[in-house]
Amino acid sequence: MKRLFHFSFFCKTVFSTRSPRSHDAALLFAVLPYSASAPYAGAASATVERMFMAQYLVDACGFDQEKATEASKLLKGIQSRQQPDSVLAFLKSYGFDDASVKRLLLYFPKCLLLDVEKTLAPKFRAFEDLGFSPSDIVDLVWSNPATVQVKHERTVPKIEFWQGLLGSKDALVKLFKRNRAILSYSIEKKIQPNIELLRECGLDGPKLTSVLRYCPLIVAQNADFLKTLISRAEDLGVPQTSGMFQCTLRALIKVSREKFKMQMELFRSFGWSKDDFVVAFQKSPSFTGMSLNASQRKMEFLINEVGYASSYIAIHPTLLVLSLEKRLIPRHQILATLKSRGHCENDYKVATFMLISEAKFIEKYIMVYKDRYPDLSELYAKLKPL
């Protein structure tokens, strides 16, 4: 209620300080052909409304002329700034900036027709009752604009369902940001049956939560597709009882059978056998999600620049999921520099220095030598992209 009081005061201030642009409307009427017949008068009036709203969307919402003209066709009956201004004022009272307002209106222009007191305010209060802060609500609507279009009586139960599964509001907000359509799926017809299928595979409790947090689209698939995904994992030697089973499903959902075969052929060109590829996949399935170009570049760098044997990379496939620009190249250059100065001979041919955390790498390979080689820190900073 306190927020609504401040919002009402804000609206009054906005409306009292803005000067109406009646001359614009008068000009539009002036250029339209006059007719005493009602149909022509109605058509002229509708044209004026569309032209008025198109200009409003350009001036107040940052639309380009083409998008504004298209959207204005959906905004019938608005003849003054009062109605759309009230919606914009309400959204901005919650912290929506110009970019987020524009994103919402591009998806759902009719939002400008909604009654603030009867429609928008109750909807946002319902989100607040679920524990969402104003910034959370901005994130929710920004990532899922349909939440404003759909009645909150339908949206709230879905939010409660996902919040119960994930166990935290923060995880829920992250889910919304990553998956714009997640609230559009039927809980009863699609999500719940797929969750039961995963539970039958042994993915329950923390394992299920992990799947839902990092790859919720698994449970948004057609049931037959999910069953096929499970079969693919088992055919690749990853049983349901394996600790890698959930990681395998998360990787396979991003890689079609065709791309999987193409990845296999690429690595075979570097000397891997089919068994090498399958074993590498069992250890680190996510490396198959890279583009073929990225896979090739990493293999060429690790073999030609770092000096690893292809068979060594097959045993340590986690190397392939590391960023080439942010980790592999900068760390290699630091180790190459130290080696040229007579250090790290024993560490140079193992993957340890590539796999350890950033803090440990800096401590072990830069800070230890800061007095002797103060240039290392500056070199490492230059090598890492911003």
Image (cartoon, rainbow, N blue to C red):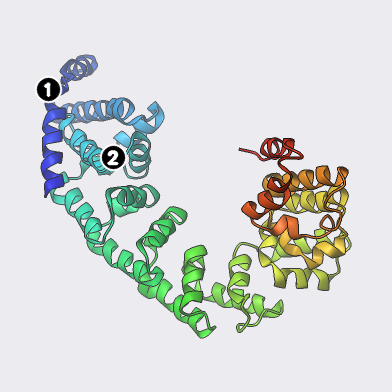
Q: What residue type is labelled 1?
A: Ala
Of the pair 109 and 2, the residue shown nearer to us:
2
Rendered image quadrant of residue 21: top left
Of the pair 385 and 264, the residue shown nearer to us:
385
Q: Which amino acid does label 2 sit on?
A: Leu
Left or right: where 14 falls relative to 182: left
Q: What SS does tag 1 mark?
A: loop
Q: Say which residue label 2 marks.
A: 74
**Vertical placement of 313 versus 118: above or below?**
below
Query: Do the numbered discs 2 and 1 sit on residues whose CB atoms are within 8 Å?
Result: no
Work out how far the residue at label 2 is from the one at label 1, CA to CA, in angstroms: 27 Å
Query: Quadrant where the C terminus lies?
Result: top right
Q: What SS does tag 2 mark?
A: loop
Q: Where is residue 69 in the image (x, y as percent from the top left)?
A: 35, 30
Mark 2 or mark 1: name the one nearer the start of the chain: 1
Left or right: where 278 falls relative to 134: right
Left or right: where 316 falls relative to 7: right
Rendered image quadrant of residue 9: top left
Q: Position of residue 10 (x, y in %)?
A: 15, 34
Rendered image quadrant of residue 252: bottom right
Of the pair 233 and 168, the residue shown nearer to us:
168
Q: Position of residue 44 (x, y in %)?
A: 21, 26
Q: Where is residue 8 in the image (x, y as percent from the top left)?
A: 11, 39
State whether residue 320 appears in this view.
no
Q: Which residue is drawn at 45% across and 81% down?
A: 196
Q: Say which residue label 1 marks.
A: 36
Packing grade of label 2 (10 A; few <14, some 14-19, many >=20) is some
Of the pair 37 and 337, the residue shown nearer to us:
337
